[in-house]
Amino acid sequence: MTLLDTCSNVRRIRESIVLPGLRLDILEQALQRCRQENQSAASAWLMTQFQNH
């Protein structure tokens, strides 16, 4: 997981800075699914996540 160092405090990034609203746990799950399923199934799951959030 990516860490961000701000003023000597380390905090875990939970949401994309570039794509506001995209939770990084969803992205991690999508990457895991790409390893376990075919690309079409993983893409369909990710699109469903985008529609539900």
Image: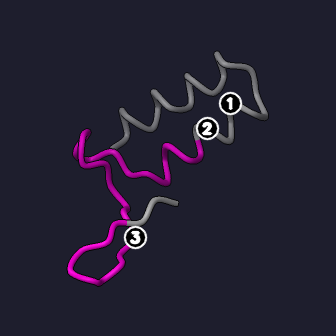
Residue annotated with mark 1: 34
State if disc 3 and disc 1 touch (CB < 8 Å): no
> Residue 2, relative to residue 35: is it above or below?
below
Q: SS at mark 3?
A: strand
**Residue 31: numbered disc:** 2
Q: Which amino acid does label 2 sit on?
A: Leu
The residue range painted magenta reads 4-29
Number of numbered discs on residues: 3
At a point 33% along the width and 45% down the height, the residue shown is 22
**Residue 12: numbered disc:** 3
Quarter of the image with the C terminus in it: top left
State if disc 2 and disc 1 touch (CB < 8 Å): yes
Q: Residues within 10 Å of mark 1 (few under 14, many from 20)?
A: some
Residue 18 image offset from top left, x and y in percent: 24, 40
Tell which of 43 and 13 is nearer to you: 13
Name the residue at the bottom extreme. Answer: 8
At a point 36% along the width and 33% down the height, the residue shown is 51
Q: Which amino acid does label 1 sit on?
A: Cys
State if disc 3 and disc 2 touch (CB < 8 Å): no
Residue 39 image offset from top left, x and y in percent: 67, 19
Q: Which amino acid does label 3 sit on?
A: Arg
Residue 44 image offset from top left, x and y in percent: 55, 23
In 3D space, how far apart are the residues under numbered discs 2 and 3 (Cα atoms)? Answer: 19 Å
At a point 31% along the width and 48% down the height, the residue shown is 16
